[in-house]
Image: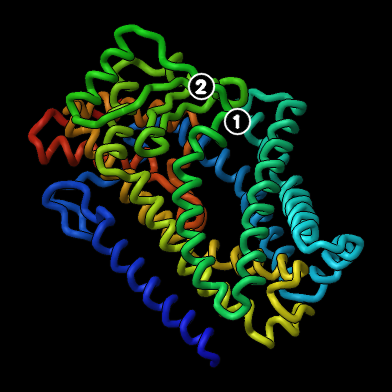
Amino acid sequence: MTNARLAAALTFTGLGLALLITLALTTPWQPLPGQIAGHPPAGAVTPDPARDFTAAQLTRSASFSGDLRGPAYLGLAAELLSVLAIGLTPLGARLLGMVTRPVRRWPLQVVAASLTLTVVLQVVALPFDAWSETVLRRYGLSTQDWTAWALDWLRSSAIAAIMWIVVFLLLHLLVRRFPRYWWAPAAMGGFLLVVAFSFLYPVIVEPVRNSFTPMKPGPLRTELLRLAASDHVPVRDVLVADASRRTTALNAYVSGFGSTRRIVVYDTLLTSASPGEIKLIAAHELGHAKRGDVLHGTLIGALGASAGICLLYLATTSRRVLSRVGVTSMADPRAIFLVVAVVTVLTQLAGPAENLVTRRIEARADVHALDLTRDPVTFVRMQRTLSVRNVSGLRPDPVAYVLWATHPTGPERIAMARTWARLHQVGEPPSLVP
């Protein structure tokens, strides 16, 4: 192993250990008081979907999850197979060679290769995205016509193309300037790019998909701002997203940090949920803001990106790998598909662990909402409303839960609220199904 590869391997090991230790120490493994990590607290309520959801609702949830399983699993398989097929064989290099051969300057070659990459990835995903859209329409979750859906798809493709172009131009600039040790400045640059993207996302990317307007003055806005003030959480604004132009789903979230932090509420939520339920959802988002979850997630992601770039260097400087792909070095724009193949594999491997951590963070935000409002009865009603309206998985497939679930299920959150009520000696919410 050369000195450069040894240094990259040692740096990856150090960053990986730092990431694991940070996650182990900062993840709220026991969000409820008196809870031991990995074990429910004494008197914990077991999740029971049949206690709060009717047989028809359970059937509809299971049917929806089953119908989405096809495009989800097949789409994932198609993405992995296509990326690996063109990234780990000479096929990708040949394709990019045909595209870049007429262009002489390397920056233009990188741009051409990045655009080709975007087209390939988007075309592979297109039939499965369209399939998912038909399922969403069948269950009344999508309000878009195909023209609006296609425009959204084109906008997403354009954003993806711009991101790939920026990333690969910077990467190839470093590879050409530091051919042996490009991983070091790339790791630092990756860290900074993740932080910058998280900071700019609310003001650059989010407006592409939705329009945002300040919540109109009134009792609800006043109450939400009062709630934030009582929680000692500085919030720049409470915004309403025009989500109804594409979906009937209910949602709210917090994004950004510092001067870009804001709470965003879907307009569908304002017309479908009671003020008490909206207040609880806002309290949940305040929990994220108070704990700095966006900043924490950004820094964790940035640290993971830095470690991933070191591992990417080790994979893409292997002579055996380069020979198999048909390129001589990372400085060749034809190696772009190899980079994407490695990144895709790393992302898929890290996904389940990331989702596990995110579910615990979401559970902590739920506990924060209960601590702030002390209203588990409304909390349970709110979770039932969200689950029914969004046709959430009430008894999710275990594989799908591990691969994609970033939040606890509705029954899990309801059970935790009842456990919270028992621990705090507050009236336990009754069953919502007689």
The residue at which mark 2 appears reads as 212
- Alpha carbons under labels 2 and 1: distance apart: 10 Å
The extreme left residue here reads: 425
Percent of width and height locating residue 187? 49, 66
Task: Identify the residue at horizontal 66%, vertical 30% (top origin).
Answer: 138
Front residue of 70/121: it is 121
Residue 1: tell me if it is visible: yes
The residue at which mark 1 appears reads as 209
Percent of width and height locating residue 44? 18, 47
Asked if the residue under mark 1 is in contact with the one under mark 2, i.e. CB atoms within 8 Å, the reply is no
Number of on-image labels: 2
The extreme top residue here reads: 218
Is 40 above or below relative to 14? Answer: above
Does residue 9 appear left or right of residue 106 in this picture?
A: left
Q: Amino acid at mark 2?
A: Phe
Question: Label 2: how many residues lie within 10 Å, few (<14), some (14-19) or many (20+)?
Answer: some
Does residue 368 appear left or right of residue 349 in this picture?
A: left
- In which quadrant of the rendered image does the N terminus lie? bottom right
Q: Amino acid at mark 1?
A: Arg
Front residue of 324/180: it is 180
The extreme front residue here reads: 177
Q: Quadrant of residue 48?
A: top left
Question: Label 1: how many residues lie within 10 Å, few (<14), some (14-19) or many (20+)?
Answer: some
- In which quadrant of the rendered image does the C terminus lie? top left
Is 3 above or below relative to 261? Answer: below
Is 39 above or below relative to 142? Answer: below
Task: Identify the residue at horizontal 39%, vertical 18% (top origin).
Answer: 273
Task: Identify the residue at horizontal 37%, vertical 23% (top origin).
Answer: 237
Does residue 319 appear left or right of residue 98 in this picture?
A: left
Front residue of 90/405: it is 90
